Amino acid sequence: MVLAPVAEFNGPGPARCRGQQRKYEMSGIDVSSGIQEFVIERARPPERYRIASAVALGWQVAQLFHSPVHRGPASDPERGNHLPGRSDFPGASQSAWLGEQIQSQLQRLLARPPQVLMEATSDVLTALTDPGRSRDATLDAVFTLHCRLLEALTVSDVLLGKAYGLGRAIAETTLLPANAITDGQRMDQFRSMLEAGRLITIKDWLADLKSLLPDHTAYAVSRSLRDWQRWVAAAPDTADWTAARSAIRVQGRLWRELLTGEKAARDILSLSDYLAAGRRGTLEIIVRFWWVIAAIAILTGGVIYAGSFLHSLPDLVRVVGSIAWLAGAAAVFARGAAVVLGQGITHAEGWLWQTELDGSVAMAATCLPPGAKKSLARGASVGRLIPDPDQVSLQRRDQLRREAEADTYQ
């Protein structure tokens, strides 16, 4: 064993380095054709990056399974007067790209994938590049790949398995209603995908992964799911399901960008969103600490009142005394606020500001059908992943748990 340079993470597979580096780790030696080289393993990516990659992987597999199976070769478009964009390539080529993206994500997440998983990946790529592919054979291959992925990721790291399941579940929540052909099918898919029991599981995953997902994402996705659930539950059979399909497509893009880290949550906020967060934070301070504000107001009024009756003192002395009292009161208030709120009020990045940004991101990241109203981000529910669960949802959660326990002990 020798000391070998540590390579920065930049994708899967081993790295070969020569020369001087600043950091070192234990590694083996690879001798090929008489040339001695250092062989090292790439550094493991940050945990947040791995969780986002697992979410993206789940989304990609769901997208591939629910996409049309295109016949014909995966080929380039005919050359024209301009270079082609992605939409100019045939559907078979785009499906093959998606399969290769899945393979790339898998290699980033698992340094040594099980053989059965590699075989399942190879079967999918073979099916996607076969000009005479059949729908059933292709879907069977993708289904098997999904099962092996869920198994391998869960065994490797239970959080990766949850993240993969989260990406798959959120993707199907948007893809199935959007892909439905008739209004009746869209209505059924909306009600199935946004059923209370199913959303309980998704919100539980969001709660478990909150600290590893991008900032403000878990709460924003959870709250927009709640708004969609309420709209679907109240929507009549004659609702405009075509408009709802367009809205869920936009909503799915927002969810994917936030969950996979394609876009930072703050990037979707406007100036008015920041101002709204500031107003809510100020109001929250007033509501929670009104007694401190009232005490300062009474003290200030008392100083002014007392000063006005001290006629025997010179005017300059009275003014200086009043200013001193007011300065002391302000100092006491500032010190008390710092002790009570800590970083929530003394630093712009404190917990109070972050919580209010949760509410603004949730509002900005929600895209409902025309005429539907978003739930207001205010009060104690801001920042909670499952705000005020209703009794039906709680009963459904208990029922699912009882069924799971019954299956375990049979």
Image: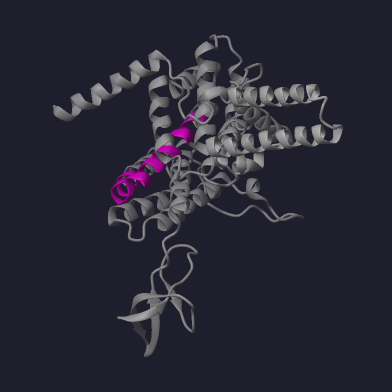
| Percent position of residue 38, x then y | 39, 80
Q: Quadrant of residue 24?
A: bottom left
Residue 157 colored in magenta in the image: yes
Query: In this view of the protein, which residue sits in the foreground, 402 or 315?
Result: 315
Q: Which residues are magenta?
A: 149-174
| Percent position of residue 169, x then y | 43, 34
Residue at 53% from the left image edge and 35% from the top image edge: 340
- Tally of marks: 0
> Taking 111 as reference, is 288 left or right?
right
Residue 130 appears anywhere in the view: no
Residue at 18% from the left image edge and 30% from the top image edge: 408
Compared to 401, does 352 lie above or below? below
Q: Quadrant of the C terminus?
A: top left
> Taking 326 as reference, is 222 left or right?
left
Query: In this view of the protein, which residue sits in the foreground, 254 or 377?
Result: 377
Residue 87 colored in magenta in the image: no
Q: Residue furthest right?
A: 315
> Taking 116 as reference, is 107 left or right?
right
Main secondary structure type of the part rendered in magenta: helix
Q: Quadrant of the N terminus?
A: bottom left
Residue at 29% from the left image edge and 19% from the top image edge: 399
Compared to 398, does 235 lie above or below? above
Compared to 177, does 337 lie above or below? below
Q: Residue furthest bottom?
A: 34
Residue 402 appears anywhere in the view: yes
Q: Residue furthest left?
A: 410
Q: Quadrant of residue 334?
A: top right
